[in-house]
Amino acid sequence: MRSSPKNMNADSSVKTADKRKEAEAAVCVGREDDIKQSRRITASVNDREIVVFYHEEKFYAMDCRCYHAGGPLHLGEIEDIGGHLCIICPWHMYKITLATGEGLYQAINPTEPSAAPKWRSKGVKQRTHEVTVDNGSVYVTLSDLSVSLDSDYYAEKYKKFGSSFRKK
């Protein structure tokens, strides 16, 4: 027996709701002490490759591949750029804030008397994710995937399938 279009839409909306719930669920990515010691790990959360950083007593999570050209952010250095903690992409030195995923660049405003370049935001380019710690375990909850960001292209291109946890 064939499904009617009405039933197909109902099945489709159930699958969409299931995927949404899966994306909203917190996934354990490791033990708090291990991540603190290593300072960073990569993990696959619902088939999305992410990197978790531990820096200055705080956890941060974001898509593992840089929004610009897919560079491996887990290999980058963390620096303070204009008062913002940033990961520096090792491929092209793009600066991305750990807290918000904003891309930063230096610019000179020709209408200002000072010719010194200042750090400016390109806006949020890199997807960041929520990190929680519970009973010695670190969990990552993916951010709202319904809002498109530049890093989504490389997250999809380098998508990991299989287990929900992978450590490098």
Image (tube, grey):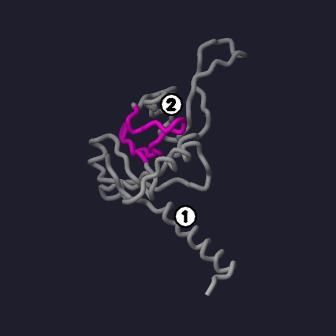
Q: How many numbered markers are drawn?
A: 2
| Amino acid type for the residue under numbered disc 2 | Lys
Task: Please identify the quarter of the rendering in which residue 29 is found.
Answer: bottom left
Give coordinates of residue 10: x percent, y percent: 63, 77
Residue depicted at 37% across the width and 37% down the height:
56
Nearer-N-terminus badge (2/1): 1
Give coordinates of residue 99: x percent, y percent: 49, 41
Give coordinates of residue 39: x percent, y percent: 32, 40
121 magenta-colored: no
67 magenta-colored: yes
Magenta extent? 50-76
**Residue 20 got which mark?**
1
Between 35 and 146, which is closer to the camera in this rendering?
A: 146
Q: Is residue 168 left or right of residue 50?
A: left
Badge 2 density bin: few <14, some 14–19, many ≥20, Cα 10 Å: many
Residue depicted at 30% across the width and 55% down the height:
136
Between 150 and 114, which is closer to the camera in this rendering?
A: 150
Q: Which residue is mark 2?
A: 95
**Residue 64 got which mark?**
none
Give coordinates of residue 160: x percent, y percent: 42, 53
Task: Please identify the quarter of the rendering in which residue 115 is found.
Answer: top right
Q: Mark 2 falls on what kind of element?
A: strand
| Amino acid type for the residue under numbered disc 1 | Arg
Residue depicted at 51% across the width and 26% down the height:
82
Please identify the residue farthest to the front as the structure is shown. 1
